[in-house]
Amino acid sequence: MHYLTFVSRVARLTGTSEDRAATLTGATLETFAERLTGGEVLDLAAQLPRPLQGLLSPYPRDEAAERFGAAEFVARVARRADCDENTARDAVRAVFVTMREAIRGGEFQEVVVQFPRDYRDMVEPALAPAAANRR
């Protein structure tokens, strides 16, 4: 998937402009990089458009992942994107759905299993069989 396609898809799912969707996508991916193990971050980055790959750098540059819940994930995205938490939550859902479309094979499932149950309302829309055709 190309960068502009990725951002356009997030914009459509969130009902925002493409510029705003790019900001929301960046904030979400930077937060993903903090939450996932270094190996998963690098595997995920390799399958995303090149302009998004730099946002997925392992933090703190090693294999460890920070452990924080869905509320903290959304709060971090909201701070980074300078938006309210409802907008951030919608953005995270949209980025999950778009990543599922962009990532080949089982890599998306490997990413999703690293998120605990409290992320369910953000992850499940991406796991639905018709996620790509819903909106």
Image (cartoon, helix red, strand yellow):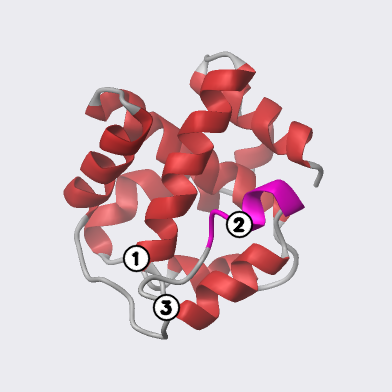
Figure check: 41 above or below 91: below
Bin the neighbour count of mark 1 within 10 Å (Cα to Cα): few under 14, some 14-19, many 20 and up.
many
- Residue 103 appears left or right of 14: right
Instruction: Give the camera-side residue of 65 and 105.
Output: 65
Residue wearing tag 1: 35
Figure check: 68 above or below 99: below
Q: What kind of residue is marked 1?
A: Arg
Q: Residue 93 at what x, y percent from top left?
A: 44, 39
Residue wearing tag 3: 37
Residue at the spot 33% in from the left edge and 40% down from the top edge:
77
Label 1, label 3: how far apart the Cα atoms are: 7 Å
Label 2, label 1: how far apart the Cα atoms are: 16 Å
Q: What kind of residue is marked 2?
A: Gly
Is residue 49 in view from this perspective? Answer: no
Instruction: Give the camera-side residue of 76 and 121.
Output: 76
Q: Residue 107 at what x, y percent from top left?
A: 63, 72
Residue wearing tag 2: 54
Q: What kind of residue is marked 3?
A: Thr
Which image quadrant for residue 132? Answer: top right
Residue at the spot 19% in from the left edge and 50% down from the top edge:
72
Residue at the spot 70% in from the left edge and 38% down from the top edge:
6
Instruction: Give the camera-side residue of 35 and 81.
Output: 81
Bin the neighbour count of mark 2 within 10 Å (Cα to Cα): few under 14, some 14-19, many 20 and up.
some
Of pointers 2 and 1, the one earlier in the residue sequence: 1
